[in-house]
């Protein structure tokens, strides 16, 4: 995942934790974990700049400069469970998590429980990432495609099949390129 300013790149590595690279070359690589957490490789930057990683215990927040743990939000037992991926809208107004065949959308104009967006193909979602404008969300899934979602009506507007096999994640650069 890229930070909002495009300066940092965070990469989750199975059983090894997360590596944060400063693409400007001003800082050394920061390694976070695995130190007792049961890691998944899903990572992302929150709008405030904190790095969030999905662990089996919940969403764990870190300072990307030092690797210091900022807190853990346990999984909601009535919610979607350990998520495959998550994405924060660039303005911080929405958080999307992907779990199996559903996107859960928190925030926006509707308070309370998350809105649920089902995959019309009935396949599991694997990755999710917002476009820098916040207007579109890109998802990958077990069907080996990338889908583009309009975030206002939450409707899929485009689907790409590049015939490269399953894509476990999607990353959007700060200029908005896949």
Image (cartoon, rainbow, N blue to C red):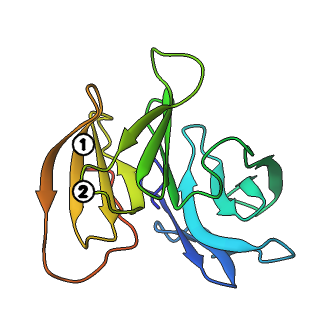
Residue 177 at least partly seen: no
Where residue 152 appears, as percent x and y from the top left, is: 28, 25
Q: Specify the quadrant of the image occupied by residue 166.
A: bottom left
In the visual, does 168 lie left or right of 32?
Answer: left
The kind of secondary structure element at disc 1 is: strand
Q: Splitting the image into 4 quarters, where does residue 134 fall? A: top left
Residue plotted at (65% across, 48% down): 50
Rounded to the nearest angstrom, the CA distance separating label 1 from label 2 is 14 Å
Dot 1, how many residues are within 10 Å of its Cα: few (below 14), some (14-19), or many (20+)?
some
Quadrant the C terminus occupies: bottom left
Residue name at image x 64 percent, y 42 percent: 79
- Residue underneath mark 2: 121
Nearer the observer, 138 or 143: 143
Classed neighbour count for the residue bearing mark 2: other residues with Cα under 10 Å, few (<14), some (14–19), many (≥20): few
Looking at the picture, how far across and down is residue 128, in whole percent? 40, 54
- The answer to which of 143 and 65 lies nearer the viewer is 143
Judge left or right: residue 69 versus residue 43. right
Q: Earlier in the sequence, mark 1 or mark 2?
A: 2
Q: For residue 56, which numbered disc appears in the image?
A: none
Looking at the image, is 130 positioned above or below residue 171?
above
Compared to residue 166, the image places residue 10 above or below, namely above
Seen in the picture, residue 107 relative to 17 is either above or below; the reply is: above
**Residue nearer the viewer, 66 or 104:** 104
Residue beneath label 1, please?
A: 149
User: Looking at the image, can residue 33 be seen?
Assistant: yes
Residue at 65 percent across and 60 percent down: it is 54
The image shows residue 69 at horizontal and vertical percentages of 82, 56
Q: Position of residue 15 (x, y in %)?
A: 69, 85
Question: Considering the numbered disc 2 on the image, is that residue within a helix, a strand or a loop?
Answer: loop
């Amino acid at each position: 995942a890229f930070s909002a300013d495009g300066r940092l790149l965070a990469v989750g590595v199975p059983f090894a934790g997360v590596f944060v690279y400063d693409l400007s070359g001003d800082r050394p690589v920061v390694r976070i974990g695995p130190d007792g957490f049961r890691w998944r490789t899903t990572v992302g930057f929150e709008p405030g700049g904190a790095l969030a990683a999905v662990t089996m215990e919940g969403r764990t927040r870190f300072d990307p400069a030092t690797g210091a743990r900022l807190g853990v939000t346990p999984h909601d037992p009535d919610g979607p469970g350990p998520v495959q991926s998550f994405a924060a809208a660039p303005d911080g107004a929405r958080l999307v998590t992907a779990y199996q065949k559903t996107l859960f959308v928190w925030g926006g104009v509707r308070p309370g429980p998350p809105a649920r967006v089902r995959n019309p193909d009935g396949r599991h979602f694997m990755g999710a990432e917002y476009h820098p404008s916040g207007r579109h969300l890109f998802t990958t899934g077990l069907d080996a495609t990338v889908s583009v979602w309009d975030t206002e009506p939450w409707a899929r507007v485009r689907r790409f099949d590049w015939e490269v096999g399953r894509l476990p994640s999607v990353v959007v650069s700060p200029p908005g390129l896949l």
